[in-house]
Amino acid sequence: MAVSDPIADMLTKIRNASQARHEKVDVSTSNMKLQIVKIMKNEGFIKNFKKVQKDNLSFIRIYLKYDESETPVIHGLERISTPGRRVYSGYKDMPRVYNGYGVVVVSSSSGVITGRKAAENKVGGELICTIW
């Protein structure tokens, strides 16, 4: 069965693996997913990631991050725009996630960036997901 929303599928895999306290999770590769994972790494939500090639299949291996008491660093991942309902925002109306503790991922004309960077660069775009 084909996945109709690959980004939502990736977020669900990460959310489930994090709640189950797995060390790592593998997701299929795409440029958009890679950019989202890079943002998660830069914002400190995951330890690391790497692209893996195996038997003509390429996927992203994401190493999850936990604090001292083995609690997942990722408390929530939520898809905003879906294939059936796209959500856009201008830079002035960029949402804040948990008063700045979380991150909103935006697909803008200058690439996939955080909502904070979009507001700084004065560009709007499609709201992909929130991470907190």
Image (cartoon, rainbow, N blue to C red):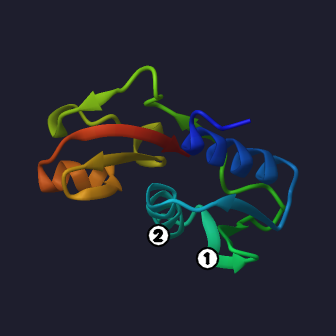
- Residue drawn 74% across and 35% down? 1
Give me the C-alpha separation between circle 2 and circle 1: 16 Å
x, y percentage for residue 110?
A: 20, 58
x, y percentage for residue 47?
A: 65, 73
| 2 or 1: tag closer to the N-terminus | 2
Residue holding disc 1: 51
Looking at numbered disc 2 in the image, what kind of residue is underneath it?
A: Asn
Secondary element at image label 2: helix
Q: 18 left or right of 73?
A: right
Q: 108 left or right of 95?
A: left
Above or below for 13 versus 4: below
Above or below for 51 versus 73: below
Q: 98 left or right of 116?
A: right
Residue placed most toward the observer, 45 or 59? 59
Looking at numbered disc 1 in the image, what kind of residue is underneath it?
A: Lys
Q: Which mark is residue 42?
A: 2
Image-quadrant location for residue 60:
bottom right
Residue placed most toward the observer, 96 or 20? 20
Image-quadrant location for residue 75:
top right
Q: Residue pushed farthest top?
A: 85
- Residue drawn 73% across and 63% down? 26
Secondary element at image label 1: strand
Label 1: how many residues lie within 10 Å, few (<14), some (14-19) or many (20+)?
A: some
Q: Residue pushed farthest left?
A: 122
x, y percentage for residue 120?
A: 17, 55
- Residue drawn 72% across and 65% down? 64
Number of dots carrying numbers: 2
Label 2: how many residues lie within 10 Å, few (<14), some (14-19) or many (20+)?
A: few
- Label 1 near label 2: C-beta < 8 Å? no
- Residue drawn 11% across and 49% down? 122
Residue placed most toward the observer, 33 or 23? 33
Q: Which mark is residue 82?
A: none
